[in-house]
């Protein structure tokens, strides 16, 4: 069902996004799907990934977990059954101006398969940020800058997650209790 939906809606989405440039602010109708930044979230590919794609996903996850203490996980098996929240990611051919998109109707990420290396990693990190309900900003260095392909998740981005989801309990907290 989700697969059919994405195939039908993506061309329309892409036409809109290319006109907007980079990645647009999601404009949702109905219930939006977002992920709690303090809860385990497993990123699962919609189809088998190339080595480069898997490296990009793992790197983007690492940037968030290191900077903001998120609990993003990765499972390379498209049919993986995960214990907690599941965030599908799909690599898709698209025009160069389209970097990626977070579909908040289905809670899934789309990435332009022409992106490679650091640009790919940053684009994935940006869309995962939308998954955490972050919006675009130019107020400070941020992975959420519109069209961003080079700025990693920052301390300000970590603060933005705390503002949205609250401060996550840390393993140090658990150890002292
Ligand atoms: Zn965006």
Image (cartoon, rainbow, N blue to C red):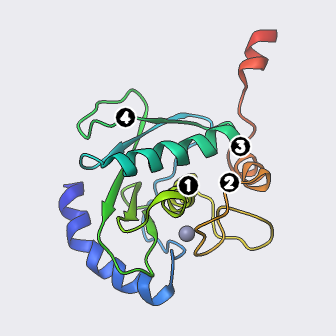
**Percent position of residue 135, x then y:** 63, 66
Residues tagged 3 and 2 counted as in contact (Cβ below 8 A):
yes
Which residue corresponds to the image point at 63% horizontal and 38% vertical from the top-left? 65
Q: CA distance from mark 1 to mark 2?
A: 7 Å
Quadrant of ligand 1: it is bottom right
Could you tell which of marks 2 and 4 lies nearer the N-terminus? 4
Could you tell which of marks 1 and 2 lies nearer the N-terminus? 1
Is residue 73 at all visible to an observer of this figure? yes
The residue lying toward the viewer, choosing from 176 and 97, is 97
Could you tell which of marks 1 and 4 lies nearer the N-terminus? 4
| Secondary-structure class at tag 4 | loop
Decide if ligand 1 comes within 8 Å of the CB at mark 1: no
Q: Where does label 1 land, which residue?
A: 125
| Secondary-structure class at tag 1 | helix
Q: Where does label 3 land, which residue?
A: 67
**Percent position of residue 129, x then y:** 58, 56
Near mark 4 (Cα within 10 A), the count class, few <14, some 14-19 or many ≥20, is: some
Q: Left or right: where does residue 8 sit relative to residue 148?
A: left
Which residue corresponds to the image point at 19% horizontal and 55% vertical from the top-left? 1
Q: Where does label 2 land, which residue?
A: 153
Which residue corresponds to the image point at 51% horizontal and 60% vertical from the top-left? 127
Could you tell which of marks 3 and 1 lies nearer the N-terminus? 3
Q: Where does label 4 land, which residue?
A: 75
The residue lying toward the viewer, choosing from 131 and 48, is 48
Residues tagged 2 and 4 counted as in contact (Cβ below 8 A):
no
Q: CA distance from mark 3 to mark 2?
A: 7 Å
Q: On screen, 148 above or below 97?
A: above
Residues tagged 1 and 2 counted as in contact (Cβ below 8 A):
yes
């Amino acid at each position: 069902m989700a697969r059919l939906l994405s195939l039908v809606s993506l061309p329309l989405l892409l036409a809109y996004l290319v006109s907007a440039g980079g990645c647009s602010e999601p404009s949702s109708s109905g219930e939006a799907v977002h992920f709690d930044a303090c809860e385990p979230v497993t990123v699962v590919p919609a189809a088998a990934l190339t080595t480069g794609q898997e490296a990009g996903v793992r790197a983007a996850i690492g940037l968030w977990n290191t900077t903001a203490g998120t609990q993003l996980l990765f499972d390379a098996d498209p049919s993986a059954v995960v214990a907690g929240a599941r965030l599908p990611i799909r690599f898709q051919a698209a025009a160069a101006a389209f970097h990626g998109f977070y579909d908040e109707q289905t809670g899934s990420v789309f990435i332009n398969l022409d992106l490679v290396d650091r640009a790919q990693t940053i684009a994935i990190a940006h869309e995962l940020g939308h998954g955490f309900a972050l919006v675009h900003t130019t107020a400070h260095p941020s992975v959420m800058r519109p069209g961003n392909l080079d700025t990693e998740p920052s301390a300000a981005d970590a603060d933005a997650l705390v503002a949205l989801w609250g401060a996550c309990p840390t393993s140090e907290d658990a150890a002292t209790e």
